[in-house]
């Protein structure tokens, strides 16, 4: 088993990715963490990791601060060289896993000097086009012997187009744990059960699980719900999530005259009651984040047909007209048509649900993703 040092400067690292390394620790891997994120440090302390807080300079992926980062780079490298040497000697660290650009630029050359292996984790949706050209050149220059682990073919293709070495890029794919159907008892539990009961009487429930700090297409979703109500009234839209735009969504529902059909229920720790109450899942977050794609996989595992928008990074798991619908953004009429079609054709709804379940079981299970990652480390 390798002794792994995780190096993370992300403000909001993916919990799904961090969960992979927690699982590796449970399987006997020795894990250590250096991070600039207090929340992540506290979280990993509770899991008995060796943790240390460190400074990696201003964010190099932001043009305004990148210049300052490069001015500080010699000092950062000097400082972290001795920390890395200490960890190599004391804890026998032989593999570094870098999450973001700052630590890649600082630690990759240092690891080469100390003869340590390096892995970069590349999440979907990283915007290289917004970086300084020198940053992309530096990353290409230092990664000749680095393994780059990605989670989607789209990310792999993007890196290849940026002239990163094809042989160095490995896709471990997405994966979910299939024991997520836990229930939470709170003031909304009765609502979830009531909606589930109503479903058997003809009520059709569209479910959304979203970070309400970055909602996407919600105005068009509300317009689509309003269109659907012209055809049938036994319709509910359940929105699970919390964020700064929640009040705005409540106001928007009133403006569209659908407030009695829309339920904003906040964050829910366990989603068992809710998955059981949904008839269709609607993915509404902007950008191809791993958390959003995994939520789509959970919906599919629950046998829910899923509707999402083109360009949202889930095209690798959602096949149009097979296990759900891919629709263009900004077209509430098309969204309404798909919801109505699923409401009227229970045979299609059930077939899509079964296809989605089989796809997850065959290709996107967490245990298999973990084995693929172990193989590459």
Image (cartoon, rainbow, N blue to C red):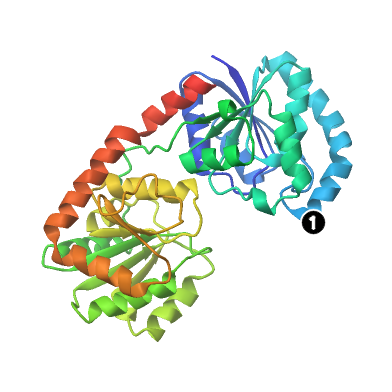
Work out whether 252 lies above or below 352.
below
The residue positioned 41% from the left and 30% from the top of the image is 369
Q: Quadrant of the C terminus?
A: top right
Quadrant assignment, res 193: bottom left
Q: Quadrant of the N terminus?
A: top right
The residue positioned 57% from the left and 30% from the top of the image is 166
The residue positioned 57% from the left and 25% from the top of the image is 167
Instruction: Classify mark 1: helix, strand or loop.
Output: helix
Residue 183, can we see it? no
How packed mark 1 is, by other alpha carbons closer than 10 Å (few <14, some 14-19, many 20 or more), is few
* Coordinates of residue 178 in the picture (x, y in percent): 31, 38
The residue at which mark 1 appears reads as 64
* Coordinates of residue 217 in the picture (x, y in percent): 44, 68
* Coordinates of residue 131 in the picture (x, y in percent): 71, 50
- Judging depth in this view, the residue of 142 and 100 nearest the camera is 142
Quadrant assignment, res 147: top right
Report the side of 108 relative to 68 (left or right): left
Quadrant assignment, res 31: top right
* Coordinates of residue 260 in the picture (x, y in percent): 30, 79
The residue positioned 69% from the left and 29% from the top of the image is 143
Report the side of 359 relative to 48 (left or right): left
Work out whether 354 lies above or below 78.
below
Total count of labels: 1
Residue 28, can we see it? yes
- Judging depth in this view, the residue of 112 and 56 nearest the camera is 112
Report the side of 8 relative to 323 (left or right): right
Report the side of 88 relative to 26 (left or right): right
């Amino acid at each position: 088993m390798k002794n792994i040092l995780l190096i993370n400067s992300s403000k909001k690292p993916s919990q799904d990715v961090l969960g992979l390394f927690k699982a590796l620790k449970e399987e006997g891997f020795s894990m250590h963490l250096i991070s600039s994120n207090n929340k992540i440090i506290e979280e990993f302390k509770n899991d008995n990791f060796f943790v240390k807080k460190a400074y990696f300079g201003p964010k190099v992926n932001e043009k305004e601060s990148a210049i300052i980062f490069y001015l500080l780079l010699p000092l950062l490298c000097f400082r972290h060289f001795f920390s890395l040497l200490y960890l190599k000697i004391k804890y026998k660290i032989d593999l570094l896993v870098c999450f973001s650009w700052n630590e890649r630029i600082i630690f990759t050359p240092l690891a080469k000097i100390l003869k340590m292996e390096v892995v970069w984790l590349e999440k979907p949706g990283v915007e290289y086009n917004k970086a300084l050209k020198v940053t992309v050149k530096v990353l290409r220059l230092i990664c000749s012997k680095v393994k780059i682990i990605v989670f989607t073919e789209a990310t792999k293709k993007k890196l290849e187009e940026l002239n990163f070495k094809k042989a160095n890029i490995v896709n471990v794919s997405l994966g979910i744990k299939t024991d997520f159907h836990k229930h939470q008892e709170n003031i909304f539990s009765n609502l979830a059960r009531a909606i589930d009961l109503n479903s058997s009487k003809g009520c059709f429930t569209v479910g959304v699980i979203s970070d309400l700090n970055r909602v996407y297409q919600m105005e068009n979703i509300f317009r689509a719900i309003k269109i659907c109500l012209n055809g049938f009234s036994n319709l509910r839209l359940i929105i699970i999530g919390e964020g700064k735009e929640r009040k705005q969504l409540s106001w928007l529902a009133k403006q569209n005259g659908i407030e009695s059909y829309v339920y904003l229920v906040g964050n829910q720790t366990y989603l068992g009651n809710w998955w059981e109450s949904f008839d269709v899942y609607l993915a509404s977050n902007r950008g191809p984040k791993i958390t959003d794609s995994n939520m789509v996989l959970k919906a599919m595992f629950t046998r829910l047909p899923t509707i999402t928008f083109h360009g949202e990074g889930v095209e690798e798991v959602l096949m149009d007209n097979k296990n759900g619908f891919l629709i263009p953004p900004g077209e509430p009429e098309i969204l309404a048509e798909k919801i109505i079609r699923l409401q009227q054709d229970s045979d299609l709804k059930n077939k899509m649900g079964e296809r989605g379940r089989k796809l997850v079981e065959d290709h996107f299970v967490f245990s298999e993703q973990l084995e693929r990652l172990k193989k590459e480390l």
